[in-house]
Each structure stands twice: as structure tokens, then as C-alpha cells.
Amino acid sequence: NNVASGSLCFVTCTTCHLCTVLILLSFCSLSRRNMSSMLAPQADQVVTLSEWEDRWLEGRIEFHRPQVHEMLENNIDKVLNGRTGVRFFFPLCGKAVDMKWLADLGHSVVGVEISQKGVRDFFEDNNMTYSVETVASLPGAKVFKSSEKNISLYQCDLFNFSSSIEGQFGAIWDRGSLVAINPRDREKYAALLISLMATDCRYILNTVVYNTELHKGLPFVVPDEQVHSLFGSHCSIELLHSVEALTDRLRSWGLDYFTENVHLLIPKTSNASEY
């Protein structure tokens, strides 16, 4: 009887384990299908570098915020993690006022932006003098350096930038960059950003989610599942905030919801004590 009971228990446990595995596989498959259907309407969307430059020249920069982003302010302690003099990287930086805010706090900033107008506007809007230099290792690129603050902005194609230019960084603020990259370039983008992360880097990533059947972008939708597929093998990922951010302007696009998500990415090679 004990043998029979044990055999029955073993069969039951094995069956339960198999059911659990099948349920998880089914869930993952459904999740992938949902992500694919969400991404499909925007998969072939392309915005060229010249189109970005035209947007700046024509003043079509609705994405620019005249004040420091509250998501950066609210999470600055998590980003700094007790550190001072942190080197921040701003991909597709535009003229973000967040850069001066961080420099005023004693940190250094390196940004990359394709629009020369955007870079010049940053310094002029903040009444900062600057120098302009060519970059020997980046043909056609220029670097604009503040005379007062530790801020260097490279005017070039982001995908031509690399750690050989400025090394790696202790923090990355990605607000409006991943969501502006052409969807087909996301894996290349993730590989670049990962290569720029120092072992103690803390990467704050801002993404958006909405019904892609109602709006083709910009900004482009990046679901949480894709954040994990792009960065999960190299970074631990924590969802810090998820907020409904639907405005009248977004409603005018025909949207019925617009969710902003903020993720904290930390290299898996980081020392456990840093968590």
C-alpha cells in the first residue's frame, strides 16, 4: 500500500509539474503573440535623420519639455545610489533641461543629438558659452563643450557613437530615445546602450504604451515584454512607475489611453551590495 501510495504521489506530482510547465509555456506564447500584434502596425515605420533635422528647423519639437522631467527628479536617489560626480549619458538628448540640472548638481553629462540646432539651442537657451570641435574618430561629427559646466554634446548619428569616444557611463537617462528609434533598429540600439554601461551603471528608461491601431507614432510603443527581451539577458529590470498620461493632445490623435512606464536597468555584473 505504501508503495502504491508513493507511486500515486509521484505520478500526481509529475503531472502537476507538467501542467505547470505547459501553463507557463502557453502564457509565454500568448504574451509573445500579444506583443507581436501590438508592435506590428509600427514595425515598418521609419523616420530618417534628415526628417529629425527638419523637425528641429521647423520647430516641430513637441517632445521637448521646458522643465526637468519629474520621473528623473523623483528617482534621482535610485540613480545616484549614494554616488557623487556621476557621468550621465543622454541618447538623442535634444536640448533637455535635465542636462543642466544634473550638471548643476555636480555631475558630468555627455549627450548625442543629430540636430545641430538642438545642440546650439541647449547652450543658448541656458545662456552658456561653448566651444565647438571636430571629432577625429567620428568623420563629420562635432562636439560642443560647455565653458562653465561639465557638459559635452556630440552632434552625430547615435549609431556612430561608441565607448571608444567617451568610455562608459555610471548613469543613463533615456527619455524619448528608445521610443524615437526606428522599431527595426531596437536590437542594435540596445546593444549600443549596453556597451556604454559601466558595471555600476543605473539606466532609467522611459517607455510608452498605447493602441498602435489608432496611432502609428511618434513616439513608438515599447511594451514591457520587449524591454525584457532587449535588455534582460544583461540587466536586471525593475518597473519603477506606470502612470496613465493621456492628455487632450493625445486624445486628438484618437487615443483612448497612453501609459508611461519607467524602468530601472542595472547590469547583472553589478556587485550585489549595490542593490
Image (cartoon, rainbow, N blue to C red):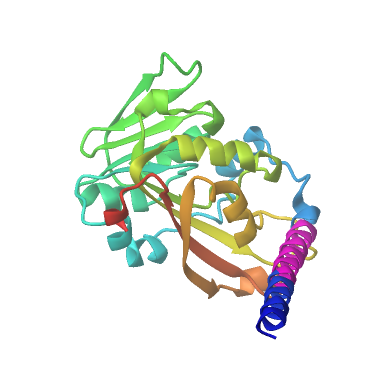
Q: Is residue 245 above or below residue 105?
A: below
Using the rendered image of the protein, determine whether residue 54 is visible from the camera's viewpoint. Answer: no
Q: Residue at x 59, y 70 (%)?
A: 259
- x and y percent of residue 208 in the render? 60, 62
Q: Position of residue 263 (x, y in %)?
A: 48, 60
Q: What residue is shown at x 48% (from left), y 40% (from top)?
A: 194
Q: Quadrant of the N terminus?
A: bottom right
Query: How would you classify the magenta stretch by its main secondary structure?
Result: helix
Q: In terms of image quadrants, where is residue 228?
A: bottom right
User: Does 106 sit above or below residue 237?
Assistant: above
Question: Residue 138's spot in the image, x, y percent?
Answer: 47, 18
Q: Looking at the figure, which quarter contains the C terminus?
A: bottom left
Q: Is residue 268 left or right of residue 233?
A: left
Q: Residue at x 70, y 66 (%)?
A: 21
Q: Is residue 172 visible?
A: yes
> Could you say which is closer to the camera, residue 161 or residue 125?
161
**Residue placed most toward the observer, 185 or 69:** 185
**Toward the viewer: 254 or 9?**
9
Q: Is residue 26 magenta?
A: yes
Q: Taking 16 as reference, is 153 above or below it? A: above
In the image: residue 138, left or right of residue 123:
right
Nearest the eye: 211 or 152: 211
Residue interval drawn in magenta: 18-38
* Image quarter of residue 77: bottom left
248 in magenta: no
Q: Residue at x 76, y 48 (%)?
A: 43
